[in-house]
Image (cartoon, grey):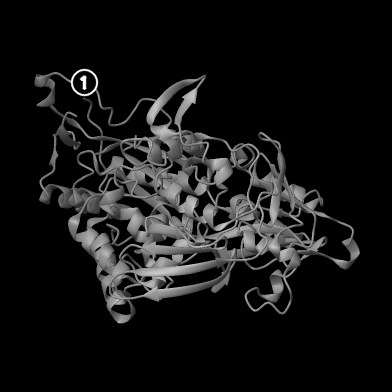
Amino acid sequence: MTDRPHPSTISRRTLLASGVALGMTATAGCVREARNIAGRDRREQLTLEIKTPPSDNDPFALRIANHVAEHLEAIGIHAQIMPLEIEELYRQVLINHNFDLYVSQFSHPPLADPDVLFPLTHSSFDSEPGWQNPFGYTDLNCDDLLVSQRTTSGADRLETVHELQQYLSRTQPFVPIAFPDTLTAVRNTRFTGWRQTAPTDPMSLLVLSPTDEHDGDSQVRLVITDARITVNQNPIAAEFRQHGLVSGLLYDSLVRYDRSDQIPWLAESITWNEDDEQTSATVTLRENLTWHDDTDLTAADVAFTYEFYADTSLGRTENPLPTARYRGRSSLVTDVHVTGQRTVLIEFSDAVQEVAETALTLPILPEHIWSEKTGGATIGGIEIDTETTEALVWNNPEPVGSGPFEFVSASDGVELIIARNPDHFLQNVSESDPTIPDRFVSAPQYEELSIEPIASDNSALEMIATDDADATLSNVSPDLVPRIGRESDVRLITSRSRSFYHLGFNTRVAPLGNPHFRRAVARVIDKAGLVEDAFSNYAVPIASILADTEWLDPALSWEGEDPTLPFFATDEGELDVDAAREMLRAEGFQYNDEGELTIVGR
């Protein structure tokens, strides 16, 4: 090994320009090679690979990865960055669990409820694919707290949620970094009703209407930098769904949330029964519901959907094969009984009503379509994986839902077109119907919605400025904000996203399974500096993913630094390399004479 100098401090402002070159090598970090017995006793420098989307897909994630890699190198850990297209990244991280570290944005469910932490960190999900516990984190104390917050309410639940946040802050299965601002450009000339929320929210697109001058315009045109939206319309595929925009327009759920309003959707009414033994709900569907292929939507479809989410093989395999998406919410349901053509009784696991309600937001699937996708996944008629059903890998090229829009066409990487569903209940609902807010009566009030993938956010903004598109679905770079301000017919929509950026650890492998090591890594991340430099201050640093909600433990409020794991900073605000190394030594980690952190070969 050659001697390399190890500075005692490192500036964060050198990272963004130089960090990309750090990890462009294709060699695998933390390669799990077969080693002979003698080789296992040899100590070698710890190498960690950081997987992240490339800059074209997500410039913020790559900047965070650069920052982490540079700081790990400074404290003697060799770090390599592997940019992967988002689909491949999610496949490797969420499905194959093939990673050391990853940086990404977590797609938050519609409610800011603390039960989001249950699938994210409960040990029962540690081996399943999807966003549920991708870290392989197993901790019985955490499990107890997660179960307790599901079964209590009021002040007792709040106290438990505070304790849970503190526990996760101490053990750090992942490092929450920041809530970004969603920056979207929209054109004002053709449609009104653009909210101060991102167009990625399907409810925000439903309330648009043509302006008086463009009353004949019937198509809302959106542009996006992620072509996956034209490739796969499977609502349960984890690697293809960054947000639920198209799924939310094509598929309905029993209940929807708009802002803070809970709206009965497919459900005409819901009657709750919460006793000492079990929480349950009797759901009555609206009359005359149909799927896009004109098949009747009945209570049997609802019962099928929840059974299917729990096991996409419907009992045909030795062990259940649940969906890789919505798993946390679907796990709340223990049984669904069809009690009539339009009524079901849904029984929930040990959960109070406020938690159980989140399970009613899952998209309902047509039994006559999905019941045929329970067999093992195959290629050319050859079964490729006994642990995967066709439902989990099917592209669903011509989706059949019941939503306010129905599928028209898709051309991979070129365009997706969906059209208003004239038979949807919103088109026929009365203004006097107390279950539907006035803003959704007869929605949508335009005929089609098109989504076109585009090369970059700069190109997307150019299309908005030249009236070739109405809004961007992808975030625009903060660098483009001044240009938006100069365009008279274009405005910036900015809102705080709850889809947080984070660094995830694969706790299944050493030393990432050691909470002391994870805490040390968390403390070399300058969250405030990243918000300033990587996000141009269009974000807020966080110590808990429940920040900005009523559930936040006040002890985890951000007051200039992380309250439990503050950045190792010198007086000048740079990385204090010596302090970070000393923490690792105090926890039993060893350095060689070259200043490299070493472990027994793995």
Picture quadrant where residue 162 is located: bottom left
Quarter in which the C terminus is drawn = top left
From the top left corner, tell me how far across and down residue 25 is, in percent: 40, 27
From the top left corner, tell me how far across and down residue 100 is, in percent: 31, 38
Whether residue 173 appears in this view of the structure is yes
From the top left corner, tell me how far across and down residue 181 is, in percent: 54, 61
Q: Badge 1: how crowded within 10 Å, few (<14), some, or many (20+)?
A: few
Seen from the viewer's position, the closer of residues 62 and 203 is 203
366 over 268 or under it: above or below: above
Q: Secondary structure at mark 1?
A: loop
Furthest residue toward front: 340
Query: Identity of the amino acid at label 1?
Result: Ala
176 over 308 or under it: above or below: below
Which residue appears at 56% of the width and 53% of the height? Answer: 244
Seen from the viewer's position, the closer of residues 155 and 520 is 155
Asked whether, in this view, residue 38 is left or right of residue 453, the answer is left
552 over 68 or under it: above or below: below
Which residue is labeled 1 in the image?
A: 34
From the top left corner, tell me how far across and down residue 309 is, in percent: 44, 49
Asked whether, in this view, residue 412 is left or right of residue 594, the answer is right
Which residue appears at 51% of the width and 41% of the height? Answer: 371
Quarter in which the N terminus is drawn = top left
Whether residue 575 appears in this view of the structure is no
Seen from the viewer's position, the closer of residues 453 and 465 is 453
Which residue appears at 74% of the width and 54% of the height? Answer: 421
557 over 42 or under it: above or below: below
